[in-house]
Image (cartoon, rainbow, N blue to C red):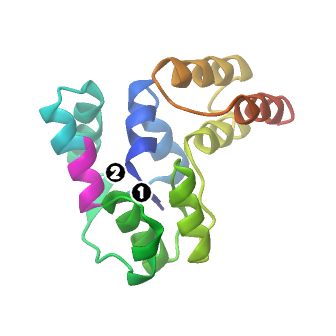
Amino acid sequence: MIVSNSTVLIYLAKIGKLSLLKRLFKNILIPAEVFNEVVIRGKEQQHFDALIVEKAVEDGWIEIKDIKTDEELEGFGIDPGEAQAISLAKSLGVPVLLDQTHARIAARALGLKPRGTVFVLAVALRKKHLSYEEYLNLLEALVKAGFRMSDGVYLEAVRLGKCR
């Protein structure tokens, strides 16, 4: 079980690999605000990834949970979805998937060890759900889909993939 924020869901859906979450973690929990960001607003803006995430919710392997935002997060300047995802993970004592740096800082401040989209791909590679070539192609697809990562993070992801 793991809690996810919006960007991980959006970008895995954009590159056709949302199902990796199910294979790796079985149950994915999202707070209501993440559902609103990804599915409700995504459909309003006609983003195809919103339909993919909505189907996963309908199929039951992504579950929506209501959560009150932890007051400790108020000073971090993170968006409501990030705050709810961190709060949900903390309340359940489970890992959280976040990509934005400021949200990761907030999660660490609350004692969590945040992970992100590249981590999901790396775990899938390590567990042999992806070949190294597929992994490299997916890293490239993420960038082409608008996923932002520094050159250093990209090169580290490539290097770590080789070391699997």
Name the residue beneath numbered marker 1: 27
Q: Nearer the viewer, residue 103 or 33?
A: 103
Asked if the residues shown at circle 1 and circle 2 are in contact, with their CB atoms under 8 angstroms apart, the answer is: yes
Q: Is residue 11 magenta?
A: no
Relative to 25, say whether 69 is above or below.
below
> Looking at the picture, which amino acid does disc 2 mark?
Trp
Looking at the rendering, which quadrant does residue 92 occupy? bottom left
Residue range of the region highlighted in magenta in the rendering? 30-38
**Observer-nearest residue: 81 or 74?**
74
Check disc 2 and report the residue beneath it: 61
Instruction: Tell me residue 153's x, y (percent).
Output: 71, 36
Above or below: residue 58 compared with residue 13: below
Q: Residue at x 55, y 47 (%)?
A: 24
Pick the residue in front: 131 or 32.
Answer: 32
Q: Nearer the N terminus, badge 1 or badge 2? A: 1
Q: Position of residue 41 (x, y in %)?
A: 18, 41
Q: Label 1 amino acid?
A: Asn
Vertical arrangement, residue 80 with respect to residue 48, above or below: below
